Amino acid sequence: MQLSEAFNSKAAQKRALKDVNCAFALACDTIKDWCVDQMERCVQSTGERGLPEVEELYFALPMYPHQWRAKHEDIIRLVYPESEEAIDLFNGIIGMHKAIKTGER
C-alpha cells in the first residue's frame, strides 16, 4: 500500500504536511532559542558580540523541511551540544515529509 493511499483526500495529505512543517519549525526554534541564549551569555560575560559559529548556525537553519541539506547537519554538529539527537530528529521529520509528499514509505 502506498502512503498516499492512506489519506482519504488531498486535503488530509496537506494537513499532514502542515503538521510535519510545524514539527520542523519547532525543532528549528529550539536550536535558535539555544543560539540566542548563548549569544546573550557571551555579551553579558564579555561585553562583546562574539560566537560567530553560533550566529552562523542561527541563520543557516532552513525554514522548511524540503530546504534541508547536508551542510545543515555539519553546522549543527560543529556547534550544538545535543547535535546527534537534533540531527536524528530533523532526519525523521524530513523522512516523514518526503514520505507524505511522494506517497512512498
Image (cartoon, grey):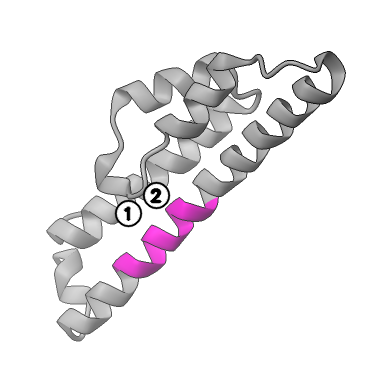
Give x and y (percent) for residue 87.
47, 32
Question: What residue is drawn where x is 53% and y is 54%?
Answer: 26
**Which residue position holds label 2?**
93
Which mark is on residue 36? Answer: none
Which is more toward the observer, 95 or 1? 95
Q: Alpha-carbon distance for marks 1 and 2? A: 5 Å
100 horizontally vs 2: left or right: right
- The type of residue carrying mark 1 is Met
Is residue 87 positioned above or below 9 on the image? above
Give the residue at x 61% y 45%. 30
Judge by depth and name the residue closer to the eye, 66 or 5.
66
Q: How many numbered badges does the structure rendering display? A: 2
- Magenta segment main secondary structure: helix
Which residues are drawn in magenta? 17-26
Q: Quadrant of residue 6?
A: bottom left
**Label 2 near label 1: C-beta < 8 Å?**
yes
For mark 2, give the secondary structure: helix
Residue 35 x/y as whole percent: 63, 32
Q: Residue furthest right?
A: 45
The image position of residue 67, as x and y in percent, is 26, 41
The kind of secondary structure element at disc 1 is: helix
Name the quadrant of the N terminus: bottom left
* Residue at the disc numbered 1: 96
Residue 15 horizontal/vertical position (percent): 32, 76
The answer to whether residue 28 is above or below residue 60 is below
Question: Mark 2 is on which residue type?
Answer: Ile
Crowd class of label 2 (few under 14; some 14 to 19; many from 20; radius 10 Å): some
